[in-house]
Amino acid sequence: MKRTITDLVNLKGKVVLLRVDFNVPLDNSGRIVDDTRIKNEIPTIKYLIEQKARVVILSHLGRPEGYDVHKSLWPVSLVLAKYLPCNVSFCNTVIGQEAKERIKLLQEGNVLLLENVRFYKQEEECDMKFSREIASMGDIFVDDAFGVAHRKHASNFGVARILPNAIGFLMEKELTNLNQILENPKRPFVAVQGGAKVETKTKILEKFIEKADTILIGGAMAYTFLKVLGQSVGRSKVYEESMESAMNILLKAKQAGKKVLLPIDHVCARMGDPSKVFVTDQLGGDMVAYDIGPKTIELYKNEIAGAGEIFWNGPMGMYENAAFSNGTYKIAESIAHAKGHTSVGGGDTVATVNLFNLAKGFDYISTGGGATLEYLENGSLPAIDVIQEKIR
Ligand code: ADP
Ligand code: MG
């Protein structure tokens, strides 16, 4: 078990460097479209300010190359101030004289947000000098940025290796939930796996064969599996480079006696003519499948209804187009109404849950995309590995 912020004593007056994930979506004019990531962080920050710590926050935003005024965290500091009962100030650098001065002036129980750490190329290089400079400004490091914990960057991995450290409440919640899925899933455990590239989902599927009882496959990736089984898929997307992996996954599932279900009907259109949409259980010719059909939805809904544990990643179809969003909607809805313990992870998948207004129905919505899948695959992540263990 990793040390958490409640294990830290005597925080009064200490400078706590808190790494968070304030990577919020922005519209074209730079306005924050959705502040969920800011709200998620409030319990950790509130706890630290109640302990009278001096809280210095580090985060990334987007993928800037050098300084980019449109990727500044300044607007985030204004939203953060709305949710906190203390002073929230902003510093437009991460390291250097200015940052040091601002931290010196920071009073107990108040918050200082530093600028986007990705304005410095040393961040993603995990440059040790940069890590040491950040670490030199604080007494303790707290990592609550689950979404980037699969990355070895300076402001998570680098700083954690230098300072005494702990995880925050958000990270703790993620680990508790994901560990439960890995170590103690309720039965039967049904994994719902959709999405696009097979390559990025091979490892998680292998994990599910080990841990789950039933795997429901949908999305573009399903057609690579159907092709491996010798079925005609028409012109649907097939990831040729992943055919062998797909074959291995099906073999492993068979050996392990696990049930893998694939779509039995499809919502499709003809190549080059997306205007005429139709349902078929026999793909062929120039047909392209963009969503699972009604019989597949019924088949999958039955499995979901009987499940004790459900983990879902990956849309069932090309949901961005309303003509092909029904499969994803129906599956999302049935998971939201299921009696089992339900979790969802993945950038696009969580976006669909919010789009369909179904978030309330889920027991757990992971804040990570790549990090969530990698944690389930490996049971650990680099930036979490470097955090100290709890002293029992
Ligand atoms: P996540 O981000 O939740 O891990 P992915 O990125 O793996 O999910 O998958 C989401 C993408 O998969 C979406 O852009 C969606 O349009 C695409 N997709 C799903 N099914 C199909 C399909 N049948 N044909 C084309 N694209 C699909
Ligand atoms: Mg995605």
Image (cartoon, rainbow, N blue to C red):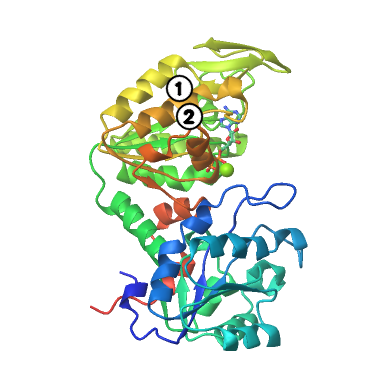
**Residue bearing the label numbered 2:** 218
Residue 316 at least partly seen: yes
Taking the image as shown, residue 205 lies to the left or right of residue 117, namely left
Between residues 366 and 302, which one lies in front from this camera angle? Answer: 366
Taking the image as shown, residue 130 lies to the left or right of residue 37, namely right
Q: Amino acid at mark 2?
A: Gly
Q: Are marks 1 and 2 in contact (CB under 8 Å)?
A: yes
Taking the image as shown, residue 20 lies to the left or right of residue 96, namely left
Residue 96 at least partly seen: no
**Kind of element beneath mark 2:** loop
Between residues 223 and 290, which one lies in front from this camera angle? Answer: 290
Residue 95 is drawn in which quadrant? bottom right
User: Are there few (<14), some (14-19), or many (20+) residues within 10 Å of tag 1?
Assistant: many
**Residue bearing the label numbered 1:** 263
Residue 385 is drawn in which quadrant? bottom left
Residue at x 64% of width, y 88% of height: 101
Mark 1 lies within 8 Å of ligand 1 (Cβ measured): no
Q: Amino acid at mark 1?
A: Pro
Residue at x 41% of width, y 74% of height: 48
From this view, report whether residue 171 is shown above or below residue 154: above
**Kind of element beneath mark 1:** loop
Q: Residue 85, position in %: x, y?
A: 47, 68
Q: CA distance from mark 1 to mark 2?
A: 6 Å
Mark 2 lies within 8 Å of ligand 1 (Cβ measured): yes
Q: Residue 143, position in %: x, y?
A: 46, 70
Image quarter hosting the N terminus: bottom left
* Location of ligand 1 given as a quarter of the image: top right
User: Are there few (<14), some (14-19), or many (20+) residues within 10 Å of tag 2?
Assistant: many
